[in-house]
Image (cartoon, rainbow, N blue to C red):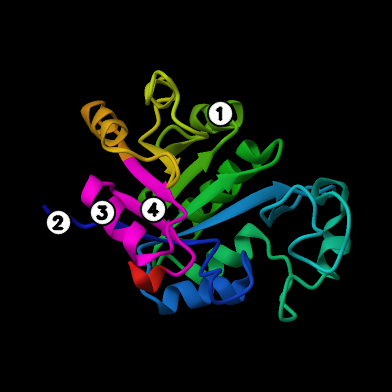
Amino acid sequence: MDKNVLKIGHRGAMGHEPENTLLSFKKALELNVDAIELDVYVCKTGELVVIHDDKVDRTTNGKGYTEDKTFAELRVLDAGEGELVPTLEEVLDVIDKKVIVNVELKGKNTALATSQVIQKYIKTKGWAESNFMVSSFDHRELNKFKQLYPEISIGALIEGVPLSYCECAIQLQADSVNLSLDFINQDFVNDAHDKGLKVYVWTVNEYDDIAKVKALGVDGIFSNFPERL
């Protein structure tokens, strides 16, 4: 049975452009994604910045911990092809309600900062709660977000397959469980669906793997090459 599977651009369209940059998010929109995934940290001066790692070394020409840098220090870095490390607001302005935005909480205090930005965009810029999803491996931070903004869908990111399968997602009152391609199987998908959870799988780039996870009945796929979905 074929069903509509959510096409989610991973860090934008990072197979084509530098990850988590405005260039990457624009490319994902060009490729007709249904949703865009990105990662956030709160930097030293309090801004919510879009970057994946706890250090800037891999994705920029800088060195050091993301959370230890001021916004001004982050803004002089090259995040690839001359792109800057963007704020969440800058990314939302580019996406402009065209697709769902999946914000992954990476660092500490990201739940509060993210809830404030989302609230601002819903109250003043015409966005809807359905325009957002929030996910994290840090289930404490995710739980904090759920308390702050219960109307927004959350996704529990999990490493491996827990013995209890999707139980942690149920306890968090999550709407989805987000699992790695390396661990996905039919039993897990069935268990999630039996519990009323959606299953989103990451990061799926090869055509064979895309076909495999679609056959398992997943609800969404994160890919660096979203056009392949």
Whole-Å distance between the Cαs marked 3 and 1?
A: 27 Å
Between label 1 and label 2, give the one nearer the viewer.
2
Disc 3: CA contacts within 10 A as few (<14), some (14-19) or many (>=20): some
Between label 4 and label 3, give the one nearer the viewer.
3
Give the residue pinned by disc 3. 214
Whole-Å distance between the Cαs marked 3 and 2?
A: 8 Å
Q: Are marks 3 and 2 in contact (CB under 8 Å)?
A: yes
Asked whether residue 221 is drawn in magenta, I would say yes
Q: Are marks 4 and 3 in contact (CB under 8 Å)?
A: no
Q: Looking at the image, is 125 positioned above or below residue 109?
A: below
Q: Looking at the image, is 59 positioned above or below residue 149?
A: below
Residue 28 appears anywhere in the view = yes
Q: Looking at the image, is 16 positioned above or below residue 70?
A: below
Q: Amino acid at mark 4?
A: Ala
Whole-Å distance between the Cαs marked 4 and 3?
A: 28 Å
Q: Amino acid at mark 3?
A: Lys
Q: Amino acid at mark 1?
A: His
Compared across the picture, whether 77 is left or right of 208 comes to right
**Residue 20 rendering spot, x and y as whole percentages:** 62, 64
User: Considering depth in this image, is 180 or 93 the residue closer to the camera?
Assistant: 180
The answer to which image quadrant residue 229 occupies is: bottom left
